[in-house]
Amino acid sequence: METRFQEMKRYARFGQDDAKLVARTKAYCAPHFTRIAQEFYDRIREHEDAHAVFTGEEQILRLQRSLVRWLDRLLAGTYDESYFGETIQIGRVHVKVGLPQHYMFTAMTLIRSELDRIIVANGGDAATRDALSRLIDLELGVMIEGYREHLSARIHAKSEHANQELTRTLARTEHRYISAVELAGVLIIGLDTTGAIRLFNREAERVTGYERDEMTGQPFIATLMAEDVVPTDGTRVARALAGESLDTPVFESVLRTRAGNLRDVRWQLAYAPADEEDEVVLFVMGQDVTDARAVEELARQHEKLAAVGTLAAGLAHEIRNPLNGAQLHVSFLERALKKAGAATPEMNEAIVVVGEEIKRLALLVSEFLDFARPKPLKVDPVVVQALCHRAVVLLAEQAAAARVQITEDLPAQELVIHGDSSKLEQVLLNLLQNGVEALAGGGGGHVVLRARRQPRVAVIEVEDDGPGLPRADAPIFDAFFSTKANGTGLGLAIVHRIVTDHNGTITVESRPGRTRFRVTVPLGNQ
């Protein structure tokens, strides 16, 4: 009997002659696969809903390599049942990660137009271009089967559930959702005696990324809780399901979204014994506090920086005048001793040491004033690639002396932000220099300067493979905190101020062998 794929090929009039025509294009199309894959995912970065399904840059790089392999298979010339099976699996993966179906169609336009342009540039005729177009249409037709399977399964499961529960719970469920649950600004999840989800409100859908019919019947702990909190929170929920009175019914935990992101949620458990008409025995109500915590932390940081800045400004003014006087008297003493011929080597050495220490204190005072009285931003369009390259060039000699290799990982498409170029350069120089200095004492290493575009922001990362911070909660952005023996503790505090002045954020992740600073700056005008 004719298979589904054979039927689709017959309907599209795609035969062996078309396969041969497509296969001949591979020789001159293959060198462009990597570029096409990068442009494909650069396009996705421009759209929030499409970009949101990815967990990070590592996953995007893996998908780019998979797209190159798919392009190689697309033009291989063999289109059998094995090919059909691999293609339909791609559609299932799109469903699994939650990629909206329309993005698959529109993004395929980029691949179609790029391959068509390459074929035309290499003298390909209309028959070859038509064969490729029909082949890509076949690909889309097969991939959509994955979406169809998923939709059919969801409709079937939803239909079964509705048929079983409709007569018994419809009126009560509708009233509960409309009057209270759906209008609440908190996550409300109802569990049955086994811990399976039976109630999932609109706010829960928004925060988690899952839809209600997908979550009905799924285990609450295994599906939504981060792995490291499962033992503790699983025990707490199990006790609540059994009707035990908890000493702390309110607790904070980490929720894992559909996209794999982690959110801080403050939960409250409320036990409600089930009756004949309602299988929910435990209400789990949560408030997403992730953004509120970030705002509070930023406000605390601003308050500390403002207080320290005021203190630094006062100290700097009080110290600068005595330092200038001391420098003048040291210079006068040096000239007097030389003129009288009474200077001994020990005296000369002492004068040099005193002079150098005064200069070091003067430099510290200047840093105090830079921190306490930052100059207004001079905002202009800034090309991120040029900014990063300039910072690497300025530190090249210091890195080479420390046997540290600095690598640039920058996007192919020009990335433009609006900001103060000199201050942003100061941020990159400070972060890169910290990375180089962290590696200098250990025989060298590797520093990566990376930039990426996201839908609304540019992300710049500085990553080194050094020993890491002394502890995970080190207050490195606080003024006067330093991990260096002779550090002033103002470098990262100034960096933090510059980034926040640009309406951006800076975070750090550190463990032995990997420390990564991440600077996020909005794309639009400040």
Image (spheres, rainbow, N blue to C red):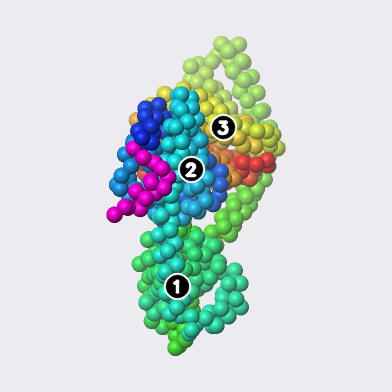
- Measured Cα–Cα span from mark 3 to mark 2: 23 Å
Q: How many numbered dots are placed on residues in this image? A: 3
Camera-near label (3 vs 2) is: 2
- In magenta segment, residue 420: no
Kindly identify which residue carries mark 3: 414
Gap in Å between the C-alphas at discs 1 and 3?
50 Å
> Viewed as shown, does residue 103 lie left or right of 135?
right
Residue at 54% across / 26% down in the picture? 390
Q: Position of residue 449 (x, y in %)?
A: 47, 34
Q: Residue at x 52, y 66 (%)?
A: 204
Q: Report x, y in % for residue 79.
A: 33, 42
* Quadrant assignment for the N terminus: bottom left
Please give the range of residues in magenta.
1-16
Magenta-drawn stretch contains 2: yes
Label 2 belongs to which residue? 108
Question: Going from the N terminus, do you reach mark 1 or mark 3 first?
Answer: 1
Kind of residue at disc 3? Glu
Tell me if label 1 and label 3 are in contact, CB under 8 Å.
no
Q: Mark 1 vs mark 2: which is more N-terminal?
A: 2
User: Disc number at residue 58?
Assistant: none
Q: Nearer the viewer, residue 332 or 447?
A: 447
178 or 522, which is in the foreground?
178
**Residue 234 image-quadrant placement:** bottom left
The residue that disc 1 covers is 159
